[in-house]
């Protein structure tokens, strides 16, 4: 499945044709992955858009850009207005919004004085949370957060996710679960993992090797509001047979039930806890 980006984008303060925001073939952002991005869902709810936790996403983007030496002058208010102006020009439907910060100029070398570009594009996306996912334990190790900070959504870091998911799909799976250097379960290629055990939710404790997703945080908020126990701890692959359900959580993926992890099978779609989380999540995003 290909997700076609919108033909117009917000680029450095104005709406332009998508290709006008493309980096030079000689851009070091293209060659080295020196850029940061974020992912935001804009839900069309019949008469208006609901953009889930927009301020948190934009603050995360700004922090990552600053830490990467890609600071930009546009305020969160500017970016919010940019997103809304883009949506106003597009057919009314659900969009995955992708802001990205990079250097478009034709310079293979690096200098702090090189101009920084900010572009926001949209991708039309269907909500297919009803489709269970088949996954396996990846042969690719999760990149160390001590080598490249995982909490910044750095373009080049996602080569790790690409290789893992591609290998999974070539082996007949939809996604992969990655282990860290100590053999602990971290997350899927671009989503946090939740495991279900009767009335309890177990999720990997945040380490430098696990992305602290905003959707993950939303799931924890839902659990707290419903009085569902959540245990954050280290999880090893040999424990996977002890669980009776599992699901992934991410901005684009939303909440997706897992059908398998390797040879372990789960009826996650019908698990009462997953159904509760899904119901609450859909109510939040249909505001």
Image (cartoon, grey):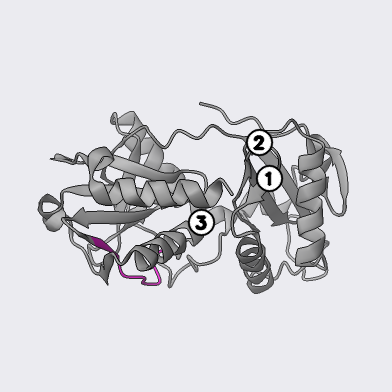
Q: Which portion, as a residue range, is magenta?
A: 201-210
Q: What element carries label 1?
A: strand
Q: Give the quarter of the image for residue 38.
A: bottom right
The residue closer to the viewer here, 120 or 282, is: 282
Q: Where is residue 36 in the image (x, y as percent from the top left)?
A: 63, 58
The residues bearing labels 1 and 2 have C-alpha atoms spaced at a distance of 8 Å
Residue 3: percent from the left, percent from the top?
Answer: 59, 31
Q: Residue at x 68, y 72 (%)?
A: 66
Residue at the farthest top position: 1
In this view, the mark in front (3 or 1): 1
Q: Is mark 3 on a helix, strand or loop?
A: helix
Residue 271 lies, in percent from the top left, at 23, 45
Relative height, residue 96 to residue 194 (above, below): above
Label 1: few (<14), some (14–19) or many (≥20) C-alpha neighbours in 10 Å: many
Instruction: Find out whether the residues at labels 3 and 1 contact each other: C-beta distance under 8 Å.
Output: no
Q: State the separation of the CA atoms marked 3 and 2.
A: 37 Å
| Residue drawn at 64 percent across, 49 percent down | 50
Mark before the other along the chain sequence, 3 or 1: 1
What label does residue 73 carry, if any? none
Q: Is residue 190 visible?
A: no
Which residue position holds label 1? Answer: 49
Using the rendered image of the protein, determine whether residue 15 is visible from the camera's viewpoint: yes
Query: How many marks do you count on the picture?
Result: 3
| Residue position for label 3 | 157
- 102 to 275, vertically: above or below: below
User: Where does label 2 land, which residue?
Assistant: 46
Q: Which of marks 3 and 2 is in front?
A: 2
Q: Which residue is drawn at 64% across and 59% down?
A: 54
Residue 92 or 135: which is nearer the viewer?
92
- Position of 221 with respect to 229 (left or right) is right
- In the displayed structure, 66 sits above or below 194; it is below
Residue 186 in the image, given as x and y percentages of width and height: 32, 60
């Amino acid at each position: 499945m290909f997700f076609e980006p919108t033909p117009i984008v917000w680029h450095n303060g104005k709406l332009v044709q998508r290709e006008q925001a493309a980096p030079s073939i000689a851009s070091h952002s293209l060659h080295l992955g020196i850029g940061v991005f974020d992912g935001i869902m804009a839900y069309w709810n019949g008469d208006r858009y609901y953009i889930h936790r927009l301020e948190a996403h934009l603050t995360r983007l700004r922090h990552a850009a600053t830490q990467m030496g890609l600071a930009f002058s546009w305020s969160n208010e500017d970016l919010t207005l940019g997103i809304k102006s883009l949506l106003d020009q597009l057919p009314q439907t659900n969009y995955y919004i992708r802001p990205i910060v990079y250097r478009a100029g034709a310079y293979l070398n690096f200098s702090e004085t090189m101009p920084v570009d900010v572009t926001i594009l949209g991708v039309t996306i269907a909500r297919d949370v009803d489709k269970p996912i088949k996954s396996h334990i990846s042969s690719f190790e999760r990149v160390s957060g001590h080598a490249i900070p995982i909490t910044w959504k750095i373009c080049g870091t996602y080569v790790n996710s690409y290789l893992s998911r591609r290998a999974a799909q070539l082996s007949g799976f939809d996604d992969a679960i990655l282990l860290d250097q100590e053999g602990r379960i971290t997350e899927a290629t671009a989503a946090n993992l939740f495991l279900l055990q009767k009335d309890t939710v177990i999720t990997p404790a945040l380490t430098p090797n696990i992305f602290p997703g905003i959707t993950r945080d939303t799931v924890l908020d839902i659990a707290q509001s419903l009085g569902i126990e959540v245990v954050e701890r280290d999880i090893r692959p040999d424990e996977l047979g002890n669980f009776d359900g599992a699901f992934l959580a991410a901005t684009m993926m939303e909440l997706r039930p897992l059908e398998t992890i390797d040879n372990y099978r789960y009826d996650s779609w019908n698990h009462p806890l997953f159904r509760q989380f899904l119901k609450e999540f859909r109510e939040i995003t249909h505001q």
